[in-house]
Image: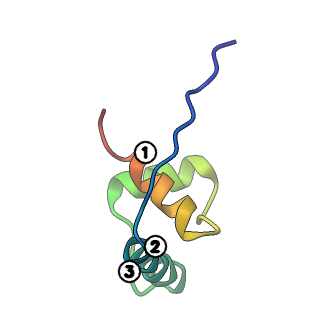
Amino acid sequence: MTRKPSYRWLVSRETLERANRYLDALQTGRQSPGRYLARVLDRRGGWPDSPEALLGALLQTKKP
């Protein structure tokens, strides 16, 4: 079995605050996710429960 690499990344407080606002907007329906983010969220089974999880989902939308 191959282990997935684990990463640590640093983000500014401003980035976390913006992610939190975006997550709130998504959850309340004021905004809808883009196509790629919607696919990631479907695979994960729903909305992230934290801004950090949202950032992780957003990172999964980027090509290597």
Q: Residue 10 carries which label?
A: none
Q: Position of residue 47 (x, y in %)?
A: 59, 66
Residue, disc 2: 16
Mark closest to the chain's N terminus, 3 or 2: 2
Mark closest to the chain's N terminus, 2 or 1: 2
Q: Dot 2, how many residues are within 10 Å of its Cα: few (below 14), some (14-19), or many (20+)?
A: some
Q: Position of residue 15 (x, y in %)?
A: 38, 71
Count of picture labels: 3
Q: Position of residue 17 (x, y in %)?
A: 44, 80
**Residue with the most extreme right position:** 1
Q: What residue lies at 49% left-to-right and 78% top-to-bottom?
A: 20
**Residue with the most extreme left position:** 63
Mark closest to the chain's N terminus, 3 or 1: 3
State how far apart marks 3 and 1 are (Cα): 19 Å
**Residue with the most extreme top position:** 1
Query: The N terminus is located in which quarter?
Result: top right
Identity, as a three-letter code, of the amino acid under mark 1: Gln
Identity, as a three-letter code, of the amino acid under mark 2: Leu
- Tag in front: 3 or 2: 2
Residue, disc 1: 60
* Label 1 secondary element: helix
In this rendering, is residue 33 above or below 31? Answer: above
Q: What residue lies at 44% left-to-right and 83% top-to-bottom?
A: 21
Q: What residue lies at 32% left-to-right and 44% top-to-bottom?
A: 62
Residue, disc 3: 31
State how far apart marks 3 and 2 are (Cα): 18 Å
State how far apart marks 2 and 1 are (Cα): 17 Å
